[in-house]
Image (cartoon, grey):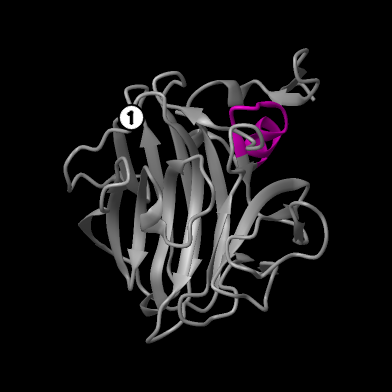
Amino acid sequence: MSGLREDALFGKLRTRKMMLGSPGNWTRVEKSLRSMGDPNYFYSNFRGIPIGQVLAGGAASGTAQASNVLSIGGQEFLYSARGTQTITIPVRVASGLNVGMDQADNDGVEVTNGLSVATAKKVFVVGTDPDFFFRCKFSIGTVAGTDDCAVGFRKAEAAQANIDDYDEAAFLNVISGNIKRETILNGDPTTTVDTTLDWADGETHTLEVRVALSGVVSMYVDGVKATIGATFTFDSGENLVPFFFMLNANAAQAGVVALQEWEWGYV
């Protein structure tokens, strides 16, 4: 127990090591411990049995954009279907949390930690919060089956049917195996740039989006900065939440899309 101390603020045992350096240098155990007590940091490796229900109470809904609560390993997420789903709760598989859902054209799911300033676990405010990040590690069974498979930040607003309908957003999007850099500013059409990086069937990768205090966005694939594309800056004062968004394609479906790690906080 010599490496642990009692944190008077949060009442949690946390290692001294995790207080130093960036989250990228922490072990899974250190991340899990930090996530228990720090409201500005969250980490999940999706261990546990997923339990879902409608946000207002009752059985989980497969109706498009209906808000459901997902509890897994004592951690809570908010998720909503795209299309009409008969599989209403993501399924735990050996590789992670399978959010592939019904496997039909334009069926899919969005996962967040909350949508509104009042209810989200954390809303990041551009120009107020110091530099922050969202990192998600996951695998895709069949990359030809993804119309969208995106990781990033979007405005804290009601769930939209299409990812392009959000007012402001910045994300990396895996579309049929091509990793795209996509941004939306003030409801304008989505700007899309090919990173020239590709994702093959069955592979696991980590996508990350960082937002500076100034609102400037940078994006990373497996820890390497994707430098292609013009600089994008969120509006100052914008309220942002991290999100994952997936839609199956017409020609093929994505198969198992397994979320393995989910992490956000200050850089």
Reply above or below: 229 against 128.
below
Quarter in which the C terminus is drawn: top left
- Taking the view exactly as shown, the residue that stands out farthest to the top is 8
Looking at the image, which is closer to me, 84 or 72? 84
Q: With 33 as the anchor, is 18 left or right in this view?
A: left
Residue reaching furthest bottom?
Answer: 251
Q: Is residue 187 left or right of residue 95?
A: left
**Residue denoted by label 1:** 235
| Image position, residue 123 (x, y; %) | 55, 32
Quarter holding the N terminus is top right
Task: Residue at 41% x, 24% y: name it.
Answer: 237
* Quadrant assignment, res 57: bottom right
On whether residue 49 falls in the magenta region, the answer is: no
Is residue 85 placed above or below 215 in the rendered structure? Answer: below
- Residue 239 image offset from top left, x and y in percent: 47, 32
Say few, some or many: other residues with alpha carbon within 10 Å of mark 1 (under 14 / 14 to 19 / 20 or more).
some
- Quadrant of the image occupied by residue 214: top left
| Image coordinates for residue 79, horizontal then vertical, percent | 62, 56
Q: Amino acid at mark 1?
A: Asp
Residue at image x 63%, y 51%?
Answer: 45
Q: Which residues are magenta?
A: 29-42
Residue at horizontal 60%, vertical 24%?
A: 17
Q: Is residue 206 visible?
A: no
For the residue pair 5 and 249, the one nearer the viewer reads as: 249
